[in-house]
Image (cartoon, grey):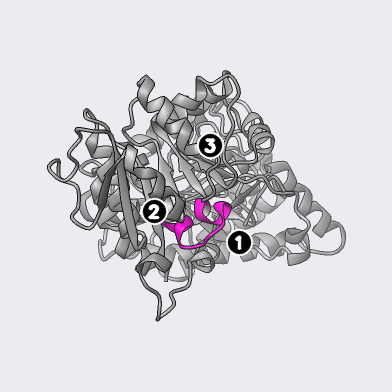
Amino acid sequence: MKVVRASEMARLEQLAIAVGCSDKQFMETAGQEIAELIEELYQTQDENAQIVLLCGKGNNGGDAYAAGCHLFESGHHLLAYQLAPLEHCSPLCRAYHDQFVSLGGEVIEVVDAGELRFSKDHLILDGIFGTGFRGSAEGLFAALIKRVNESGAPIIAIDIPSGLNGDTGEVGNVAIKAALTFYLGLPKTGFFLGEGWNHVGGLRAIDFGLPSAYVDAAKAEFLLLEHQIALELLPPIVRTRHKYQTGYVVAAAGSLSMPGAAILSCYAALRAGAGVVRLLHPPGMQPHALGLLPEVLASTWEEGEEALLRANALLAGPGLGQGQGVRATLLKMLHGLECPCVIDADALNILAKEREVSFPRQTIITPHRGEFARLLGEHVDLLRAREYVEEKKVVCVLKGAPSFVLIPEPSGLPWIIPTGNPGMATAGCGDVLTGIIAALLAQGLRPGQAALLGTYLHGLAGDIAALEITERAMIASDVIESLPQAFMALR
């Protein structure tokens, strides 16, 4: 799915209206879709439950009133707070305000934030500012947003959380922290940049009736990986296959002080479908005595040359350390490597110290921003990351919240991975990702495909684990244990 700047979405709407589409029909359709999605998601028997509409002066407020009209007709208990004088509101906002009132809806015009009352029984629908908002929320609006965020009630933002810049994700002062954002048409770049990911919550699309020709013509800044695309990337299963056809992963990972990283990456590779996983470890590590899985084969570095000749994929880096002996061994492994590889963690840090970093062909790197900054020798932004990917001809998984996948392709657009949660900010989760991607490479996916599907599955497994044991209690091995459910959910 395309991700666009807020100004691009507004341009498309105006083009459609100029050739005969109706902005009123757009709002009517959006209101109906919002109402239907709320009814699908928000079901309560609590007699105190109430849906509270926060209505600003623009068409975002009109969308809230339009949704309120449909919800009111369905029997929901509603209250609308009008946050600007009606004479200052857009014509469509006024029209749907009047329709809401004519149906019997209650509207309170607010002049002081102290008049607002919220409780945890409420569902709050944010229609204060739209995607065109720039700058800082001030005065009444700032005080109101703070009260809403402190209410403990679930908040649904229409198109964008109010106070968030739709292009950059910047928050000038304060912004709504939504549980869900119902975006109209296409998602906006500001959801995924700056502070956006901290404010949008879950994302759900609202089709407001914009003709598909305009969506097809939209100028995208990013691409959002959707579930269906991830499903289509799953490698097929052949009934007559044997373990070496399923995929042979060699892992250069672990050290005397960090054996756990090797264990996690190997375990993840097995759970992600690799038929054989062989760990190359430093002398004296005694991996099986340290808890390595019985399914994993183990060899010392000196014994690894033959394994690399047979491997379908190499993973390198988790827990390696950065000693001189490790550096020499890693560079020897990578020199002339024929199979695809995933390079992470200490392997990236070792390569960052080389005068000229040279990667094997079919390489995926999986840095977080600190590791990438060391590779670049400068501050990381997406533009510079894209240039690096093109220059080095590598696929990059830029880990973060959210993660981006950059592929050296003609389109050049970064992919956004929408899965994952804060519980995955725990030691070892990156090692799990490396193992998953290596397994998919070994099963025959191209580096770009393996990076996209592997990162999506990693986040999906993390989301499943969070549902079962909470984001607070998760550890990296929980992500691996949830991989089977992630594959089932994907299918």
**On the image, numbered disc 1 is attached to which residue?**
30
Observer able to see residue 1: yes
Observer able to see residue 427: no
Question: Which numbered marker is on residue 203?
Answer: none
Tell which of 183 and 401 is nearer to you: 401
Task: Give, as a three-letter code, the residue at label 2.
Answer: Val
Residue 207 screen position, x and y as percent: 62, 64
**On the image, numbered disc 2 is attached to which residue?**
249
Q: Left or right: 132 with respect to 262?
A: right
Task: Give, as a three-letter code, the residue at label 3.
Answer: His
Position of the N terminus, as image quadrant, is: bottom right
Cα separation between marks 1 and 2:
49 Å
Mark 2 residue element: strand
Which-is-in-front pick, marks 2 and 3?
Answer: 3
Q: Is residue 146 above or below residue 100?
A: above
Tell which of 58 and 109 is nearer to you: 58
Mark 1 residue element: helix
